[in-house]
């Protein structure tokens, strides 16, 4: 089992593993501070030859290392004993499906260290209890005693991913909080798990869900149920992120696609216009004689040229710039904080870098050039500015290619 898990973890998750076959071997490993400092999780068999009563769990947790328990015996007494030790989770060793589950837990714990959660409840005791449960999963925990404090925390920490809120609170209850949050944050980017006292759940859960909560828990709930719901919620958020990422990315080059460019770039453009900012440049770039590359060397080489082009745009873009492949061999570049002189120097430099780049595929090596049309200012809409940039691009093509034409 140890060798199987070790191999799977390294192959599928890319983490290094260290295997101990007894508590004595585990002690020898953990006594080395250099080794101990890089261990972020331990998988522990509950029964070892020299620790038949589960002593390994308290020993490893004494070093502050999160633990997943593996056990071949699972009954109510064992389950309760494991839960009381505040471990990450436990797994009953019975099939290969358990190995997949273990891998999913390890991956989840690794990701959790960068995820912020917010607990909202007017009971300090309950906040502490929930905070303790979330901390066992290595999640970052923020606290608020009512809806108003929660909104203040969310403003300071816009990267909060999960809010756990009680219904009954002073100043602003859970319903109001959920309504406020959903005005600006969708269920696919910030999850809300509502909590209510036993007896009110039939009325409360339907209303919470209609207001936009992702899930609902009735008090009292088991530690195991709570952690399963948290992990399922986080997995769902991650799945939403992956779907959005795929929808916004060009599959070949990894740059933003046309849809995302006009959606995101359009918002940026309108913000600049409202702020009276006119220091922006919109460039359209097109690979010269791209059809000849495909015809002479094949589409694999043409695809590699597109990837090289995308890599150069990505490498030369600043944090606030936006790049995209908008179709075929055509790309867009939104350059902010740039007057005409700055934009001309920037795209002339980019032109030269592209001309000096090489495409290598199998035994083929070649270079290519681009033509660039640059429209200046935000007086018109993004779409109208794009039309002007396109006209300048064709002017560069007619002028001999491998050049920048700017307004």
Image (tube, grey):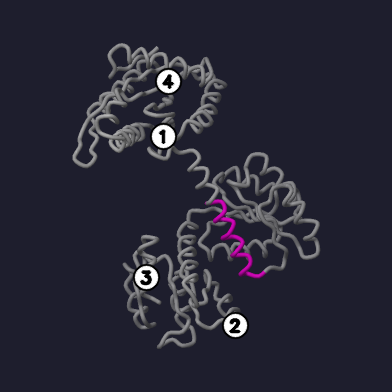
Numbered label attached to residue 139: none
Among numbered discs 3 and 2, the one appearing first in the sequence:
3
- Number of marks present in the image shown: 4
Picture residue at 34% right of the left edge, 71% below the top: 18
- Front residue of 287/109: it is 287
Q: Residue 281 carries which label?
A: 4
How much space separates mark 3 and mark 2, taking CA atoms?
27 Å
Snapshot quadrant of residue 339: top left
Quarter holding the C terminus is top left
Residues at circles 4 and 2 in contact by the CB criterion of under 8 Å: no
Mark 3 falls on what kind of element? helix
Nearer mark to the viewer, of 4 and 1:
4
Label 1 crowd (10 A; few <14 / some 14-19 / many >=20) = few
Q: Residue at position x 57%, y 21% from top? A: 274
Quickly name the residue at label 2: 75
**Label 2 to label 1: alpha-carbon separation:** 54 Å
Sequence-first disc among 3 and 4: 3
- Rendered view: 18 above or below 360: below
| Residue depicted at 55% across the width and 25% down the height | 271
> 6 left or right of 128?
left
Q: What element carries label 2?
A: loop
Residue 6 tag number: 3
């Amino acid at each position: 089992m140890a060798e199987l898990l070790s191999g799977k973890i390294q192959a599928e998750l890319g983490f290094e593993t260290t295997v101990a076959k007894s508590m004595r071997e585990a002690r020898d490993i953990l006594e080395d501070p250099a080794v101990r400092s890089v261990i972020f999780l331990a998988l522990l068999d509950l029964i070892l030859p020299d620790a038949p009563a589960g002593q390994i769990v308290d020993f490893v947790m004494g070093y502050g290392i999160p633990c997943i328990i593996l056990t071949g015996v699972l009954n109510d007494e064992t389950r309760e004993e494991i839960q009381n030790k505040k471990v990450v989770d436990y797994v009953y060793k019975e099939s290969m499906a358990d190995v997949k589950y273990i891998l999913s837990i390890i991956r989840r714990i690794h990701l959790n260290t960068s995820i912020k959660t917010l607990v909202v409840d007017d009971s300090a005791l309950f906040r502490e209890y929930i905070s303790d449960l979330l901390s066992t999963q290595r999640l970052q925990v923020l606290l608020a005693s009512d809806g108003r404090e929660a909104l203040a925390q969310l403003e300071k920490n816009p990267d909060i991913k999960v809010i756990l809120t009680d219904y009954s609170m002073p100043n602003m209850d859970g319903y109001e909080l959920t309504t406020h949050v959903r005005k600006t944050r969708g269920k696919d980017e910030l999850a809300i798990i509502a909590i209510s006292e036993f007896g009110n759940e039939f009325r409360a859960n339907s209303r919470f869900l209609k207001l936009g909560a992702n899930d609902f828990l009735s008090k009292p709930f088991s530690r195991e149920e709570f952690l399963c719901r948290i992990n399922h919620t986080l997995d769902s958020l991650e799945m939403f992120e992956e779907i959005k990422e795929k929808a916004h990315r060009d599959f070949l080059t990894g740059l933003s696609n046309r849809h995302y460019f006009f959606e995101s770039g359009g918002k940026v453009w309108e913000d600049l216009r409202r702020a009276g900012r006119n220091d922006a440049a919109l460039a359209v770039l097109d690979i010269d004689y791209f059809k000849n590359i495909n015809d002479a060397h094949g589409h694999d080489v043409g695809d590699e040229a597109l990837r090289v082009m995308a890599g150069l745009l990505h490498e030369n873009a600043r944090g606030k710039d936006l790049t995209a492949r908008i179709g075929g061999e055509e790309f867009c570049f939104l350059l902010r904080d740039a007057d005409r002189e700055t934009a001309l120097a920037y795209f002339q430099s980019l032109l030269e870098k592209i001309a000096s780049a090489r495409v290598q595929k199998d035994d083929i090596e070649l270079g290519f050039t681009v033509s660039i049309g640059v429209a200046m200012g935000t007086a018109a809409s993004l779409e109208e500015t794009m039309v002007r940039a396109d006209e300048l691009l064709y002017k560069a093509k007619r002028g001999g290619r491998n050049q920048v034409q700017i307004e």
